[in-house]
Image: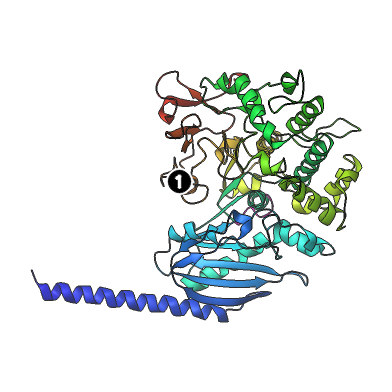
Amino acid sequence: MNVSLIRCTATALLLAALVGSARAQQACVDLKYMKLPYTTITSAAVATEGPIPQPAIFGNAQPTVAPERCEVQAVTRPTKDSEIRIELWMPLSGWNGKYLQIGNGGWAGSINRTGLVGPLRRGYAVAATDNGHVSEGLVPGAAWAIGHPEKLIDFGYRAVHETSVQAKAIVRAYFGRGQNLSYFSGCSDGGREALMEAQRYPEDFEGIIAGAPANNWSRLFTGFVWNERALADNPIPPAKLTAIQAAVLATCDALDGVEDGLIENPRACSFDPRSMVCTADDASDCLTEGQVATLRRIYSGPTNPRTGERIFPGYPMGTEAVQGGWVPWIVSASSQAPSIQASFGNSYYGHAVFEQSNWDFRTLDFDQDVAFGDAKVGPVLNATNPDLRSFRANGGKLIQYHGWGDAAITALSSIDYYENVRTFLDRFPDPRSENTDIDDFYRLFLVPGMGHCSGGIGPSSFGYGFLPVRTDAEHDLLSALEAWVERERDPEKLIGTGTAVNDPTATLTRPLCPYPQTARYLENGAPNNADNFECALPADAQ
């Protein structure tokens, strides 16, 4: 063995790596001189490996360690009143040739920096935006929208599209070539952004993940005020939610063949809150007549008092007492502070619709005021257009997911949109496509027990936050989308992982089936094992 030759080769490789790294670092720094339309690059530098603080809106303030990267910050101003901040991270080496954009949450107002970490580790050039304004706090409002219609447009759709355009130009300049494929992933408002992109800008992304989308923004926030009004009339104390959930599960848990603390298909549940009416004095395990009325209003959702028309779907049964669910979203944890829904709903009508800082939720007319909000800001904020023909014709693939236990955005709204798209494609076939099969490009996965975007109970971990249990296409959402876009392997099912509800020491795996299929127990084997289930149409859909 020629030891000298081996040493020389190793030295040469090391020098080449150092030279390559130096060039990458210099190329990164040089980006600050790049000229882009109505856009200023405010910073371009190599960021060393280290912790990234988490903005409060994205869950907590715990840092996440990000690897070394080329970090670019920019501001784009497509209008005189626009101030859209963009952040782009690019690997110094090992780029996978792809671009991924991350969505925001709530009313936005900050950049989801920790959401950039996972994709960067997977080799992506990854970007995010603050949607055109700066807000602080766990539940930021929309006071910034008063008197600023262009900023509302930036939030609604323009900022996300402009981020895609400007970030891709920077990627091209840094790597010397453009990306091979582009992906988008977002949840909540980010899910709304995802569907907005598919509808308005079908050529921006080849693959899209839309989690728990707040796409019917004007009607969703109307539902928030509906719940606020119902609870103001007849409050339900948080202590009663445990008894409510127990009563629901006693009625419906076994409908899916397994009594495991999870309801696979809450739409099949016919629990009647009147069964809990107190027969004597009020107590924590029963409901007053007024509380029965409130619970029914939350389950059924808002209706127009003049026409009886449903405005927005209500909330599914079975996860009322799950931590981080109805409390604090629907029911306030304290009499001293509003619920999260109340805060968002009041800001929507007060700031975005009526442009008043002191709007009173008790004054909302669920007929005329709802129609006014739909007409004024719905065209900017709502991503409800069912025409996805151009997205499909461009080769786009869309995976949508939603937790049945989501107390922020009801999973029934995702079903509404999916069914609207299906109906539209059936009625208006696209001559550019050979068939109208919605499953050819669009899959919806409903997750039993899962909360808003993450957490809850049951099989709620499947890679949506880019920290998957496993990175194969069955256990990781992004890998599933990549396989669909890049290898035409359609996602027949996902495997969700979690902790068994009835045994916190046991691991639970369960197939997540594309709607309208649900997971059916095969009546033998351990019910905590996904292998003992199959995806099948529910009896009422066969």
Magenta highlight: main SS: loop
Count of numbered badges drawn on the protein? 1
Q: Is residue 155 magenta?
A: no
Query: What stretch of residues is rendered in magenta?
Result: 199-204
Q: Is residue 202 magenta?
A: yes
> In percent of the image, x 58 and y 32: which residue is there?
515
What is the residue that sits farthest to the left in this orientation? 1
Q: In this rendering, would 171 be left or right of 57?
A: left
Relative to 420, residue 14 above or below: below
Quadrant housing residue 322: top right
The x and y percentages for residue 256 are 55, 22
The x and y percentages for residue 432 are 62, 44
Q: Which residue is mark 1?
A: 483
Give the quarter of the figure containing the N terminus: bottom left
Give the quarter of the figure containing the C terminus: top right
Q: In this rendering, would 424 be left or right of 232?
A: left
Front residue of this view, candidates 361 and 375: 361
Q: In this rendering, would 303 be left or right of 468?
A: right
Can residue 407 be seen here?
no
The color scheme shown is rainbow
The amino acid type of the residue labelled 1 equals Ala
